[in-house]
Image (cartoon, grey):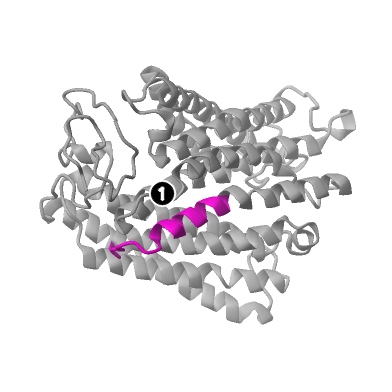
Amino acid sequence: MAFPRLNAAAFWMVPVAGLLLMVSFFVPGGPAQAGWWSYPPVSTQNPTGNLINGEFIWLLAVAVSGVSSIMGGVNFVTTIVKMRAPGMTFFRMPLFVWAVFSAQIIQLFGLPALTAGAIMLLFDLSVGTAFFNPDKGGNPILFQHLFWFYSHPAVYVIILPIFGIFSEIFPVYSRKPLFGYKVVAISSLMIAAVSALVWIHHMYASGTPNWMRMVFMVSTMFVSVPTGIKVFAWLATIWGGKIRLNTPMLFALGGLIMFVFAGVVGIMLSSVPIDIHVNNTYFVVGHFHYVLYGTVTMGLFAAIYHWFPKMTGRMYYEGLGKLHFWLAFIGTNLNFFPMHPLGLHGMLRRVASYDPEYTFWNVIASIGGFILGMSTLPFILNMISSWINGDKAPDNPWRAIGLEWLVSSPPPVENFEEIPVVVSPPYGYGMNEPLVAGAAHQE
């Protein structure tokens, strides 16, 4: 890392923020009660009269976490720009690195707004400022702008690394070079750029002027262009390949299917009339969970199974891995798909009970939730038993191309005795050339 001490400081600020959140449950008046967005004027109410209340500590935790992520973003971006291996040009970088790079750019331009908003709200609570108090000339809508300017791009911060994982896995298990490598790399930067122009679609129902609604409806729809480029490239990579449907590939395909469905629904939600109609209903909850649970969790599991042999030196049990996939895939769809018809029929989110006409889809969702919970059992069993008793993993069990696959499993502390010199692209399956100078061809 370019700044190891900065990285360590950023890391240790995360448990501090988490501890603050836990402490907020035990102060007089109870924890923060203004929702995860902490909108004023609800968040500026202080019925106990105590300076240190649950909302104050919650906002302090958000500020600490925000500073931590900004510090981490500085470290990641600097490391990628300045500390690549010899010969590792930008267009020889793995697409996972491109994805992390783009995500951290979002952190650097977006998080300061949220962190500043949390600090301003802290001042309103503690020292009597009026940034968001309309009685004293403040504007509560300003906080919504500061909050959503980062909190929607935060979705891309989370999902961009998953896109990078898909781009690593599909070429390996299709035995083909990634289609359109440079365009896919640039599309990650496009997502980072467009993410700064979409936050208003969370505020269509907040008195936003019609001209602004139209502008941000178009900009939100434009996100489908770089994401569509990625989906097209992944499908073109898989097409005609020698596909191996083992556990990492199954999870990557499952995540891709869920992302395509979530993307279609996302285009619907970017439309002003549709969004206003389903605002604050379970339709939005279903869409959100298809993105941030269906796609992201499937991608994370794909990564865990793909790199498990490299990290542990042991092979996982393929049968348990596939059982985990099918339970997770079926459970996720049964759990979250019913939320869409529920939302279209008017069931509001954040409500503890529901009317009888919503019973059928809620029962289906509950069954899916139980199946989804059960899917973690074969995963935990697989990880523990494989780590202890699994077959010894070869250095490159998937015949993958990448620097990590050139060292032993698990890797030595120093990774390489000599710094490798990269001489070819990262996805050269079917090409008769090595990745690094002096190394054997990995295909």
Q: Quadrant of residue 127?
A: top right
Q: Residues within 10 Å of mark 1 (few under 14, many from 20)?
A: many
Q: Front-most of 414 and 236?
A: 236
What's drawn in magenta, residue-wise? 227-246
- Horizontal side of residue 5 vs 232, given as left or right: left
- In depth, the one of 44 and 3 nearer the eye is 3
Determine the image quadrant of residue 318: bottom left
Residue 356: x %, y % from top left: 67, 81
Assess whether residue 106 is covered by the magenta stretch.
no
**Relative height, residue 87 to residue 368 (above, below):** above
Q: Name the chief secondary structure element in magenta.
A: helix
Q: Quadrant of residue 112?
A: top right
Image position of 261 with respect to 23: above or below? below
229 within the magenta span: yes
Amino acid at pointer 1: Ser
Task: Work out which residue is located at the far front of the displayed protein and give it.
Answer: 432
Question: Which x, y percent locates residue 32?
Answer: 62, 42
* Residue with the mark numbered 1: 167
Q: Position of residue 435 (x, y in %)?
A: 26, 36
Element type where label 1 sits in the image: helix
Q: On the rendered structure, is 273 left or right of 407?
A: right
